[in-house]
Amino acid sequence: MTTSWPVLASIAVLGLMVGSFLNVIAFRVPRGQSLAVPRTHCTHCAAPTRLVNNIPVVGWLITRGQCPRCKAPINRRYPLVELGTAALMVAITLRFGVTAQLPAYLFFASVAIVLALIDADQHQLPDTIVLPAYVIGTLLLMPAGAANGTWFDAARAAIGMAALWCIYAALQIACPTLVVPGYVKLSGLLGLFLGWLSWGALLVGVIIGFIVTVVAAKTFEVVGPKHRSGTLAYAPCMIAGAGGAVFAAAPVLGIYASMTGLA
């Protein structure tokens, strides 16, 4: 299925705007701040941000990455998140095309990005984001099920959600200091979206997630104490596994089938 350039351009603009809002969510929600008030401002001098400076990426470039008033640096992560969100949304659009399930996976990408940012920063996975995502994700997937004319995908998604939740719940019991309740709740959300795709996507997502986690943990261990602080955030690893499965599950399973003679 070929997606037209105007559609991709529109998705890219949407991604930039969503990425800008995800930056706000990632900063304010863990701190218990309102998303509406006060308006966007410098975190150092509290000067309100001008409207033109709120334009994704462009605003950061105009200010040369610093507050116009106090000259304090503005984290370059902001434009990177905006660009990354736009790129991911375009990639998802290319992956699914303009289909009934596209809105669900664009939403999934947005939630995944903001949860990865929050966990990396604050080691939190706020219930105010995770739990509503279950409901919204399910509602967005329902039209896709209706378009397919079958509820098998929905049943597989529900089983995938429960299965991944049970796996991480068991891991929490075994390793309560590493697997906190937030990761268990996140696992069910990942299982929902991976299970919807296929059993293979669910399996590949789990495998990639564990591989990324092990590699990240080993890397974290060998980093010198001068450069290491706090503990490793595992949500980005889990999310990386799910993202890898969304794009790579089909080709990976195809290669495996051809190598084992199961094709």
Image (cartoon, rainbow, N blue to C red):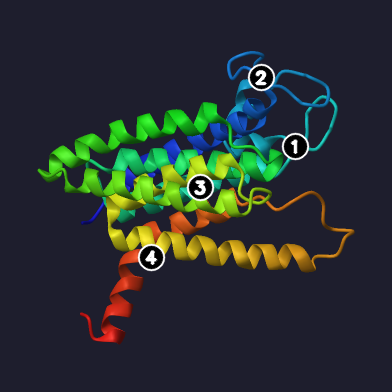
Task: Identify the secondary structure beneath mark 2.
Answer: loop
Q: Mark 4 or mark 2, which has the lower sequence index?
A: 2
Percent of width and height locating residue 197: 28, 53
Q: Earlier in the sequence, mark 1 or mark 3?
A: 1
- Estimate how packed mark 3 is, as few (under 14), some (14 to 19) or many (20 or more) residues with alpha carbons within 10 Å: many
Residue 169 numbered mark, or none: 3
Question: Dot 4 corresponds to which residue?
Answer: 248
User: Which corner quadrant of the image does residue 225 belong to?
Assistant: bottom right
The residue furthest top is: 37
Q: Nearer the viewer, mark 1 or mark 4?
A: 4
Q: Nearer the viewer, mark 2 or mark 1?
A: 2
**Dot 3: what SS?**
helix
- Kind of element beneath mark 1: loop
Left or right: residue 119 versus residue 239 is right
- Local packing at callout 4 (Cα closer than 10 Å; few below 14, some 14-19, many 20+) is some
The numbered mark, 1 or 4, whose residue comes first in the sequence reads: 1
Q: Which residue is mark 1?
A: 74
